Amino acid sequence: MRWKVVLHIIGALTICVGLTMLFPLGFSLYYQDDGIVPLIESTLFTTVIGLALFFAFRDREGNKGLSHREGMAIVALGWVAAGFFGSLPFYFGEVFPGYVDCFFESLSGFTTTGASVMTDIERNSKGILFWRSLTHWLGGMGIIVLSLAILPFLGVGGMQLYKAEVPGPVPDKLKPRIKDTALVLWKVYVLFSAIEAGLLMLGGMDLFDSLCHTFGTLATGGFSTKNSSVAYFQSAYIDYVITAFMLIAAVNFSLHYQMIKGRPLLMWRDPEFRFFGVITLVITAVITISVYSATDYDSFSDAFRYTSFQVASIISTTGFATADYEIWPAVAQGLLLLCMFLGGCAGSTSGGMKHLRIMLLFKQAYQEVFRIIHPRSVNRVKLGKTVVQPETMNDILGFCVLWLGLFVLCGLIVAATGVDVVSSFAASLACIGNIGPGIGSVGPTDNYAHIPDIGKWALIFSMLLGRLEIYTVIVLCVPEFWRK
């Protein structure tokens, strides 16, 4: 492990985090609020530390390519560093009573989880709230993916980082050069962000709220500037715009790129997209009917509006809320709980287990049943017309076992702190799935402030595991990883 190379690149990432704090500082200066001093202090501290790491560990002779292990270490440690330095505006601004809450809120933002310990959102300064939402947008497509565009100038390769960071079993390399792939993804990301922000402003939001909610939507994060989340605006237009973009963010961004390039049929030909679309439509239809039958919504269109929003919010792991789904019928809550496990598509900004993995596991299960009936048959799991290699299936099976095991372990740790069982496991699922709201005392109308510090640290670790797809983090805990 060449620690000089690792720390050199983490220094570059830290500089990027420090410079991005200038954007919320601009809002604080415009509104003349209490965020000016904390943001200036955070910007200076973060940038200075980043520059110190960058130049102190600069070694051009050694930066001739990253090993697989170094890529893993940079991604995992880089996200922890982003969470630490991102917590400084909250800490210097005394937003929370202790540092654990500051780090929890920051890493929840960067991992696009959206689990919050902020009890009164609207009392905070505009600059602090903008930074809180901006952490979503930076973490959504990935600070690491953004850094791939500048890694060639540092003299290091980027594919190891790309494989370690990009969600999903197989990262799509859209361009021959990894730097160009990173730039393509970010161009699509920025384009959709600009479109959504414009549409929200047409619906009556000001620039500040439109940007903050755009960041939360495209990154599938869910931090809002209002205590009652999107429900504050009481606008069907805003609800439908955000619903549409939550679903867009839950789809593989390489498919969006192909659509923009004039190949929209490739999206429909993608097996995972079709699977995701059918699952989403069926769950939305069933919940809409059950909610309309059992609640007092004025019309079926109102029931569909609130249901489609919550289904999109949960299945995309965004976490925005326009209704308290805990008062909905049990079947509706059960289906939303299922959505928390599913998540979005591979290659999207969503969390969860991903539809691609679930679909392939179903195919594998069917093959096992078919093999019992026809013992001499030779069949392979296919994704479209492509045969999925056994090694890939083993990776997916191992991932799902680890995901579920760590979900249970985290839930038990939180329960051991005195939180009730339902809320403990809901919090664990919401954090490892990068969803945000769960059920019980961490439901859509509650937050995580009441959870003891030990439980919060367990949930922080779960957020990181979920965002970096388990392996990238857990491998650092294996002794063999550090051996030559």
Image: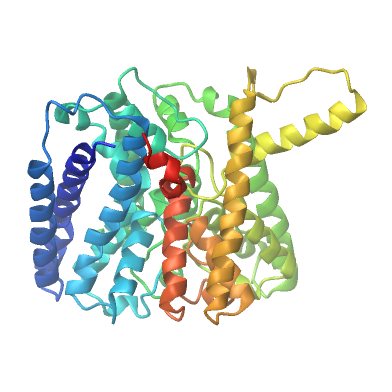
The part of the image, by quadrant, that contains residue 301 is bottom right
Relative to 48, 6 lies left or right: right
- Can you give x and y, in whole percent of width and height, for residue 73 in the image? 33, 43
The residue that appears at 40% across and 47% down in the rendered structure is 476
Count of numbered circles on the image: 0
Relative to 188, 392 lies left or right: right
Q: Which residue lies furthest to the right in this view?
A: 373
The residue that appears at 30% across and 41% down in the rendered structure is 144
Relative to 314, 180 lies left or right: left
In the image, residue 167 sits, relative to residue 45, either above or below, namely above
The residue that appears at 69% across and 37% down in the rendered structure is 361
The part of the image, by quadrant, that contains residue 364 is top right
In the image, residue 156 sits, relative to residue 17, either above or below, namely above
- Can you give x and y, in whole percent of width and height, for residue 365 in the image? 77, 36
Q: Which colour scheme is used?
A: rainbow
Q: Quadrant of the C terminus?
A: top left
Front position in the image: 358 or 298? 358
Q: In which quarter of the image is the N terminus?
A: top left
Front position in the image: 167 or 372? 372
The reply to whether residue 206 is in sight is no
- Can you give x and y, in whole percent of width and height, for residue 147 in the image? 24, 37
The residue that appears at 57% across and 75% down in the rendered structure is 415
Relative to 72, 259 lies left or right: right
The reply to whether residue 111 is in sight is yes
- Can you give x and y, in whole percent of width and height, for residue 236 in the image? 49, 61
